[in-house]
Amino acid sequence: MFPKHYHRFVAAFTMSVIMVFVMTAVITAVNTGIGGNFIQRWWEAMLVAWPIAFAAILVIGKPVQQFTTKVCSK
């Protein structure tokens, strides 16, 4: 679908969407409950959290991979 040079961005996008989807659902449910306008509150949390998660993964993703390679190489 996409050329190889987009791998980093596609991986960051996919990872951030999945993680933000799950984490904002859990945190919203724990903090405010599932009743009422849960979907709206969840969606608003996702809109705030996703760009932050995407940027963080782009910035620290490579150093984290390098670190884990060193830690797990023994």
Image (tube, rainbow, N blue to C red):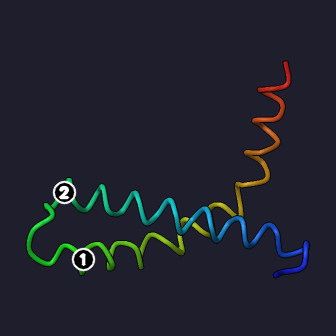
| Position of residue 5 in the picture relative to residue 7 (left or right) | right
Q: Is residue 60 above or below residue 44?
A: above
Q: Which mark is residue 68?
A: none
* Position in image of residue 36 (x %, y %): 8, 75
Disc 1 packing (10 Å; few <14; some 14–19; many ≥20): some
Instruction: Kindly identify which residue carries mark 1.
Output: 39
Gap between marks 1 and 2 measured at Cα:
14 Å
| Position of residue 67 in the picture relative to residue 52 (left or right) | right
* Position in image of residue 10 (x %, y %): 73, 72
How many labels sit on residues? 2
Residues under numbered marks 1 and 2 in contact, where contact means CB atoms less than 8 Å apart: no
The kind of secondary structure element at disc 2 is helix
Q: Is residue 48 above or below residue 16?
A: below
Q: Is residue 46 above or below residue 19?
A: below
Residue type at numbered disc 2? Asn
Residue name at image x 79 percent, y 53 percent:
62
Residue name at image x 18 percent, y 57 percent:
31
Instruction: Kindly identify which residue carries mark 2.
Output: 31
* Position in image of residue 16 (x %, y %): 57, 65
